[in-house]
Image (cartoon, grey):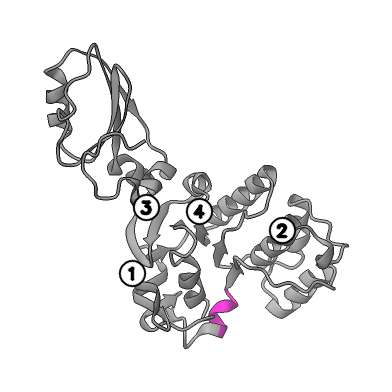
Amino acid sequence: MNEKIIETHNLTVYYGKYRGIKDVNLTVERGEAFGFLGPNGAGKTTTQRVLLDVIRPTSGSATIFGLDCRSHGVELRRRVGYLPGELALYKEMRADQFFKMYEYLRGDNGAGGYWRELAERLDLDTNRKIGNFSRGNKQKVGIVAAFMSKPDLLVLDEPTSGLDPLVQQTVMELVREVKANGRTVFFSSHILPEVQAVCDRVGIIRQGELVATQRVEELIAARLNRMTLIFADLPPADTFDLDGVTEISRTEQSLTLEIRENLPAVLAAAAQHDIRDIETHNMSLEEIFLDYYGRGNGRKNGGNNG
């Protein structure tokens, strides 16, 4: 039986009269990497801060390891590694001093000295003061601090921000290793190829509300079909004016459609004209994400929408 590591019920946060998140219901199971997707301001960080008991919800509840995040916050944080989106570090400390201090505060967890291996893999010079680091190296400090205790749950907020591509790949390898060890990752990001590469499931949050939760491969397979139809002469503009069908672009001899439903009707309509070829396109998670965020969300055929 799958064990629920994170669970929220109607989680809602208001900042005064402004809504942070509303009625967020999600479950993250042991051993999976869960991608939490949304643009800045969508509610990703607010959700994470409630989980870590940094802020309190207006209503609803959140649990980690079956324990309420409010009443067991201190206990839970011993088992959670957290990389915040905005790092606050001790600028006058050398990185190695910071890690030794952090290791002492975390206590005996069987991962003593693991920070050295992480620093080496991330090419981080731990003999320098943190205040002298570039933004990317400060991000490496945060990554090492999050991973170094080998926590049961990792909560990562935009973990590869400011890193060069090679280091980004190393971070992705670390996430995969956590999964392989049966531990859990809650991965908040807007860098969609990364999420697609390492996450088992994704939740898409829009304006504070969770609009989809699905396995990555199912989201890609089920959300949209994209098809280019090539004709000797283009049919009339209203030929594919069907529910669930959106025209994306056209040239002198072809048009591209996004198809959510009525695929048989699309093919039947195309067959009534001098069709020469059909090309299908696999949609990336990024294209699906953009669709959720307005370009195609809930619309019908709209002509040339680029």
Mark 1, residue position: 25
Residues tagged 2 and 4 counted as in contact (Cβ below 8 A): no
Identity of the amino acid at label 2?
A: Lys
Q: How far apart are marks 3 and 1 (CA)?
A: 20 Å
Identify residue type, mark 4. His
Is residue 243 in sight in this rendering?
A: yes
- Within-10-Å neighbours for mark 3: few <14, some 14–19, many 20+: some
Relative placement, left or right, of 68 versus 223 is right
Q: State how far apart marks 2 and 1 are (Cα).
A: 32 Å
Write the start and end of the magenta stretch as one range.
74-79
Disc 3 target residue:
293
Q: Are marks 3 and 1 in contact (CB under 8 Å)?
A: no
Q: Is residue 293 above or below residue 76?
A: above
Q: In which quarter of the image is the N terminus?
A: bottom left
Q: Name the residue under label 2.
A: 140
Examine the rendered structure and indicate whether residue 182 appears above or below residue 224: below
Compare residues 185 and 306 and report the one nearer the observer.
306
Mark 2 or mark 4: name the one nearer the start of the chain. 2
3D distance between C-alphas at marks 3 and 4: 12 Å
Decide: marks 2, 3 in contact (CB < 8 A)? no
